[in-house]
Structure formats: structure tokens, C-alpha cells
Image: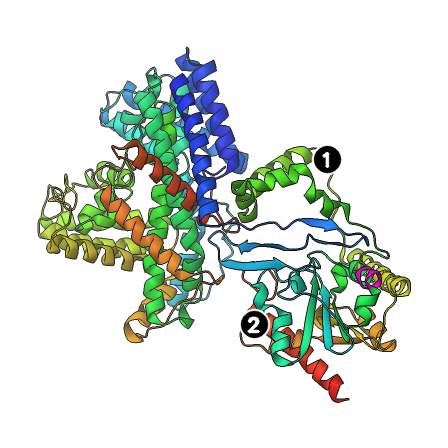
Amino acid sequence: MKKLFFKIFIYSVLILLALEVYIRVFHLTKDYPVRYVDAFGVEKWMPNQEGYSVTGNRRQNFSEYRINNFGYNSYREFNPSKDKVEIALVGDSFIEGFHQNYYNSIGNKIENQLHGVEVYEYGYAGYDLADQLHLISQYKEQFELIDYVVLGIKFENDLARAEYNIVKERMQLESPLYKAIRQIKLLVYLNNIGVLDAPKDLVQKLLSNGKKKNAPLTKSEEDKQLKELETKYLENFKRLVNTYGFDKTRFLFLLDAEQTPDIFLNHLNEYDYKYIDFSKAFQASKKPPTLIYDMHWNNNGRTIIAQLIANYVKEMKSI
Amino acid sequence: MIFNSIEFFIFLFIVYFLYWFVFKRSLRAQNVLILVSSYLFYGWWDWRFLSLILLSTIVDYLVAIQINGNDNQRTRKLWLWVSVIFNIGLLGFFKYYNFFVDSWVDMVSMLGYDIKSTWTLKVILPVGISFYTFQTMSYSFDVYYKKLKPTTDFISFAAFVSFFPQLVAGPIERASNLLSQILKERQFDYKQAVDGMKLILWGLFKKIVIADALAPIVDDIFANYSTYPASTLILGVTLFSFQIYGDFSGYSDIAIGTAKLFGVELMSNFKFPNFSRNVAEYWKRWHASLSNWFIHYLYIPLGGSRGSKLMSIRNIAIIFLVSGLWHGANWTFIFWGAFHALAFIPVFLMGRNAIYKDSVVAENTMFPSLTELGQVVLTFAIVTFSRIFFRSESITGAFEFINRIFTDFSFGTYYHPMGYRMLDYYVLIAFFVLYEYLIRRDERSPFKFKSRIVRFIVYTIVILCLLLFYDSGVDRSFIYFQF
């Protein structure tokens, strides 16, 4: 019996080592760029990093990222000036675009359609409107040189806060413990493909055993809760705009009107906020606009978005 | 609790520890542990149905004692019928009641009488009922045929009926094999334990990498068969052949491997059926424990092949039809059984049903001869074709599926329903077939390589494949649980 347990131990260690080697050699899991909070209190990626973003067990989506001098994933550096036309795309992971090669980003696709225009992508996973407006206000001088600022917004995700502060949960990912764990590629891989979900669920189940579960809400309770939330989010929007400013002549939103409640759309229309709605273009597309594994835009989706923004800029220029 | 879950491995570790470290010195304590853990294992799914297992256990335990205690043949037979009626009744109610009611209503309405079915019940099919009822019945049969003395040790008998590694999906053990091991003291054997772990690993590979990975493709093709070209339908049923093989033989391997960890040897259930050279050989290699059961307790009592050819053909037809019905309460399974009877009878009439009894394809050579290759491909094609009935939701659906293949042949590229690369699956199947061919001589030793380094590399590749094809979104339960 001792021999059996000894061999199980030895084999387990060797197999884990071999798996770590396989995962590294075949690059089966993603790299994690380092994040930080800069001197202006803006959370972004540490400048000048490169790596690969991987999705799926078998590298079904494999792309390269490059963090520029300013701390965002882009093939170009951001040097706005008065004598050029620039577009800034500000948003979350959809704009950040780790799911695509950095040289095939939305910005790049827009530039291919609008010659002479430079597109700066200020995308960062998890950015909500508070992050976006705070970034713009902190780098006011830079953004004042930019001709068009497009802010990606999703009502249900991006208006939960009425003011900016550093998201501690995100920055905790830079703690020495998390950094050390990320060095074990096998663990990162297992976590990404969902193998660790089962033990996590089991622990969760054991921990929650005996605790009373909340009774499910009725339809009318759910509706009431939703209405309250929508009102709260709209108030957050108003406060954010008041606090950080919003130049309606240059700023516009990029949103999916189908996923946006009327209360917010009406407010935008009433107060002359401009927005590009991509819902109809996505619906009209014959090919799916999103990836297999998540709802991030695939190449087709990004092309559609780029086309819509380019069309908007062309239209504005002609006016 | 299913074999491919974290709960099972925690459970297994605890039971293993108690079995060899705490209760090692007492056979009775070990058997009590097997019984309790088996009931826990089963009750994890639905504890209410434990009563059925217990009832079946009590009935056959008492019946066997009564049969053995009586010299009067008539009384012995009567007691045997008690076991048969009870177990078949249990099976009939939980598995076939609604099927028979619906079939009766359909038949009557075909004759022009319109009656509404108000007799159907909401019956939950208890997992593994077809397996453990057959196992307990086999005990009563063996005692009746005087092949076995009944045991008076109820705990051991109950442990035999509910032995958790094979409780819900076999192999369907005969008491002469399993009960005799449970009644005897078991010693820890290092080689047996290692062999068990290897089989568990190989079973997990077949289940997770082959069966679960192919499941979404097969489900998609069978659900939308009317929209796909014939080439896709052929692909779908071929992949289903591999899916069901991976699923069921994977389960059996894990069951046999787990039993080995407890010092128990279960019978082999799958012996590389995909390399069979005719349908008769296929049935010796596919679900062998069920084939054995039907041969011993149905085919031979019916007269087997001792009588006229016509009688033998009748007996063959009966066992295949019953085997079809055993799989599920649906006409699709009865057609599937009938199709296999039609495929088997010509082999029987040509006297070729036993010629491959003790050999494998390319027995003494590296590669098969062209004749053998042709035989293997033809047998695989016949068996795969029959699976259209096995997999279809209804008999009309099965015939429409077949109709599209034969009357509207067209070719089209198939895309994975979730957008994954199909090439991955084709390469996977090709390597799987090749690997199984290499190990075809011994189904109980999937990693029989002399070099320790080669063996280690194969282990790591197998585990890497488990990760590469693991899908947390797939329903991970075993197909044969529904039978």
C-alpha cells in the first residue's frame, strides 16, 4: 500500500510538471498583462507589454496584444495634435480588443476607411462610464485635441456608479499572491476552461449549506426592482456627466439600442446626446457578429462597428 | 453521483481509505461498508428508489433460499416465478407501463376506435433498474439450475446486488462471479490496484474526450436531420457510434477499474467491438455481460440452437427483440433489436457465428488482411446503420433519417454547432481508432507498454486530451443510465 501511495505521489508530481510544460510549449493559455494606477489615478495597463490572449481549450481564439506607451492595447502611439483628425474610442473590453490581433483592431479598420485619420483606442476590461469620463477629465488636454470621442456604453453594466474611485477588486489581481498563481500556467488554464468550477461549486455548496436562500421574486417585484434600478442608473448618468463634463459637440455614445431601456434613450434624445446604435446593423448581418465563447465582437462584428463609426465621421465631416 | 464528477472521486477516496485502512481486518465490516457506500452512492441521485433495490434484494434472497430448500420441482419453479414476476413487474411498471398503454391506444385508434389515454402515469425511471433487476434474477436462476448454493449472509448478498461500481450500468454480473468474491476475504494487491487506476483513466478518456466531445455534434445532427445533407447524416450516425461506444465502454472501464481497487474482478463488458469481423463477433464484444445474460437465462432455456434451424432462428429473434426492448420503452429499440436479428441470422445460417470466438482481427500480424479489413468495415457499417434506430426519437424519425440518406444523397461541409474546428474531432477519432487497434488484444490493459518512459508520455497525453476536450457545458451523465 505504501508503494502505491508513493508512486501515486511521484506520478502526480511528474504529470503536473509535464502538463505545465505542454501548456507553455503549445501556448494553450493566455498571458496576463500587468495593470497599475497611474499618477492621475487612472487604472490602466503598464505601458509597453506584449503577449497573447487565448480562448478555448484548444486555442480556438488566439490573438496578440501590444500595450502602447500610454497603457492601452493599440498598434499606434497616441499623439493628438490640432492639425490632424483623431478619433478616440473609449470603453471596456469590447474596445480593448484582446480577442483580436492588435493590428486588426476596430481603430485600424476605421483608419483603413478614413485615410489620414488616427484612431486611439482607450479600451480597458471593466471600464464603466465613471472610468471613461474620469480618464477623459484627467487627460483633458490630450482629449481636447481629439476631434471625435466615442464612448462605448452598456446601460445595465456601465452606470452602477455615480462617481469614480479605484476598483479595489481589480487591483487586488496585482497582489503578490495572484501574481504568483498566474505564474502556474496549468492553474490558469484549468481555471479558464472551467475545470476548477466543479470544486469551487462544491466548496460553495458546502459553505452555503444550512443558510437560508432568498425566496424568488414575483414578476411584479422583479419589474419594480428593475424600474428602481433604471431610475438609479439614470441618476448616476446625470451625476457623472455633471461631475466630469461632457462635450456634446465632440462626444458620442456607441450602444445597442435593443439592449438599452427607453428611459435612457429618451433622456439621450431629449438632451441632444449623440449616439451610434449598432443593433440594427448586427441584426442585418448574415454572419454572426460575436465570438463563439463569449459575446465579444468577432472580426465581422468589429468590421460593422468600424463601418458605423467611419460613416458617422464622414457624415460629420461633410456637414 | 456520476463517475466523472468530483463528488465521486472524493467519495471513492473516503471509501477506499475506510475499506483498506479501517475495516481491513473484518470481511463483514468491509461488506457492510460496501453496502452502505453503495446505498449512499445510489441515494445521492434519488434516495426514494433505494427501497426498490432493497425490495428486489430481499425478494431474491428469500426466493433463492426457498428454491434451495425445496426438492419438489414444481415448488422450486413456483418460487423462481416469484422472482421473475417480481423483477419483471418492477421493470414493467417503472420502465414500460406508459409505453404499453400508449402502444395499446395507438393500436386501437389504428383500428378506427378513438380512445383517449387517461391511464398513463408520471413515472420516474429509476436509474439502473434494468441492470440490478437482471443481476438479482440471475442469482435466483443460478440457484434454481443448481449452479450455485444460496447464501445466508444477507449483508453480503445485498452488497452483491448494490455493489456501487457496477450498480447503475453494469457489467451485469452473475452471482457465481461477483457474490463468490464478496463472500471471500479480499487482499490488497498492488498490481490489481494499479491496473484499476489505469482502467479508470482510460474510461475517463473514452467518456470525456470521445463521448462528451462528440455529443453536441450528434445531438445537433439528429435534432436537425431534416435540414442537413445526407453526408452530414452519415457523419452524425458514425460519430454516434463512437459516442455511445466511448460513453458505455468508458463507464464499464471505470466500473471495472474501481472494483479492482477494492480487490474485486468484474467481467469484461467491451472487447473492442469496432474491430469485429461479423455481427456475431460484435455481440461477443459489445455489452458482453448482457449478451451472456440473455444466452444463459433466455436463449438456452428456450432451447438455444439444439432444436431445428427454424427453432433456433425463432430463439435468436426473441433474444434480439427482448434485448431491444430491454434498452428502452420505445419502438425504435424494438426495430433496432429486429435489425440485429436480421443481421445475425444469416451469419448463424452460414455457421459463422462462432468462428471468431477466441481471436482478434490480425491475430498474429501487425496489419489486417484485405478480407479482414473489409469484414471489419462492413460490420461497423451494419452496426452503425442500426444505430439510426437506437438514436432517433421516434420510429418515423428514424425512417425519415434513412430516407434522406438513400433517396436524397447530397454532400455538404458540416460545421460544429458551437463553431469549433471539426478537424480536431476527425483527427481525434482517427487516433482513437488507431490506438485501440494497437491495444486490441487485451481490453483490460490499455497502457501496455514495456518502456516506462513511453507509458508516462502516453499517460500525460491522455490527461492533456482530457483537458483539451473537456467541456463544462456538456451534460456529463452516461447514456446507459436511462436504460
Return the residue found at the far bottom: A318
Q: x, y (%) of residue B265?
A: 31, 27
Look at 19% across and 58% down and name the residue there: B378
Quarter of the image for residue A158 reads bottom right
Q: Is label 1 in a helix, a strand or a loop? A: loop
Determine if the magenta segment contains residue B101. no
Q: x, y (%) of residue B259?
A: 37, 28
Q: x, y (%) of residue B412?
A: 36, 72
Q: Are marks 1 and 2 on the same chain?
A: yes
Residue B329 visible in image: yes
Q: Is label 2 in a helix, a strand or a loop? A: helix
Mark 1 and mark 2: Cα distance apart in space: 46 Å
Q: Which residue is mark 2?
A: A300
Going from N to C along the chain, the mark reached first, 1 or 2, is 1
Residue B284 shows which numbered tag? none
For the magenta stretch, what is the residue range? Answer: A134-139
Look at 65% across and 40% down and name the residue there: A178
Q: Which residue is mark 1?
A: A211
Determine if the magenta segment contains residue A136. yes
Does A236 sit above or below residue A268? Answer: above
- Identify which amino acid the numbered label 1 is placed on: Lys
Q: Chain of mark 1?
A: A
Give the overall secondary structure of the magenta segment. Answer: helix
Return the residue found at the far top: B25
Which of discs 1 and 2 lies nearer the camera? The answer is: 2
Look at 41% across and 11% down and name the residue there: B26
